[in-house]
Structure formats: structure tokens, C-alpha cells
Amino acid sequence: MSDFISVTCELVKSKKDASRWTVRHSTYRSDGVKAAIITVDGAWLDMNKRKLTALDANFAYQFNEIPLSEDFEWIE
């Protein structure tokens, strides 16, 4: 319970416009042992239209600045 952890985040897959993506989080114990891997698939939702959407170009650029995984791939 009182152990410290660290978490890394890397982009595994993404469309060029960052509208669909996969992010991998790796959790490490304080002794460096990997404790968990969490993979999240996501997309952006326009709340007014209630439809999936792409990010504004500025936000897409920032989103794609997330470190890339060794097995990163662009998706169509």
C-alpha cells in the first residue's frame, strides 16, 4: 500500500489526425519490476454531434508528441 510506483505512457497506434489511437501504460514498482501493462484504445467524441471526430490540428500535433512505442504503427 505504501509503495511508490512509476507509470510510463507510449503511443502504440494512431491515425495521422489522432482521431483513433492506442496508448500503452506500463506501471513499475519502486524496485523496478514491471507490475502491470494497461492498453487503452480510444477515439474523440464530438459531444454536440454525438459522433466520433478528429482533433483540431493543433491538439492532434500535441497528442502525437506522446513518446512512440517500439512497435508503433500508423493506422488508416
Image (spheres, rainbow, N blue to C red):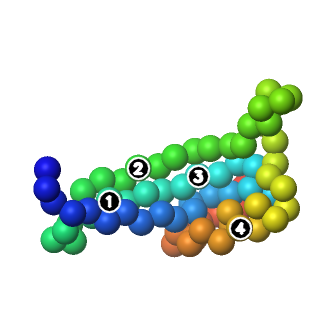
Determine the CA span between mark 3 and mark 4: 15 Å
Quadrant position of residue 66: bottom right
Q: Where residue 26 appears, x then y in whole percent?
A: 37, 60
Secondary structure beneath dot 1 equals strand
Q: Where residue 27 appears, x then y in whole percent?
A: 32, 59
Residue beneath label 2, please?
Answer: 38
Q: Residue at x 26, y 62 (%)?
A: 5
Q: Amino acid at mark 3?
A: Thr
Label 3 crowding class (10 Å Cα cut-off): few <14, some 14-19, many 20+? some
Task: State which mark lies toward you, 3 or 4.
Answer: 4
Secondary structure beneath dot 4 equals helix
Q: Is residue 27 left or right of residue 66?
A: left
Question: Circles 1 and 2: CB distance less than 8 Å?
Answer: yes
Residue beneath label 1, please?
Answer: 27
Task: State which mark lies toward you, 4 or 1.
Answer: 4
Q: Amino acid at mark 2?
A: Ile
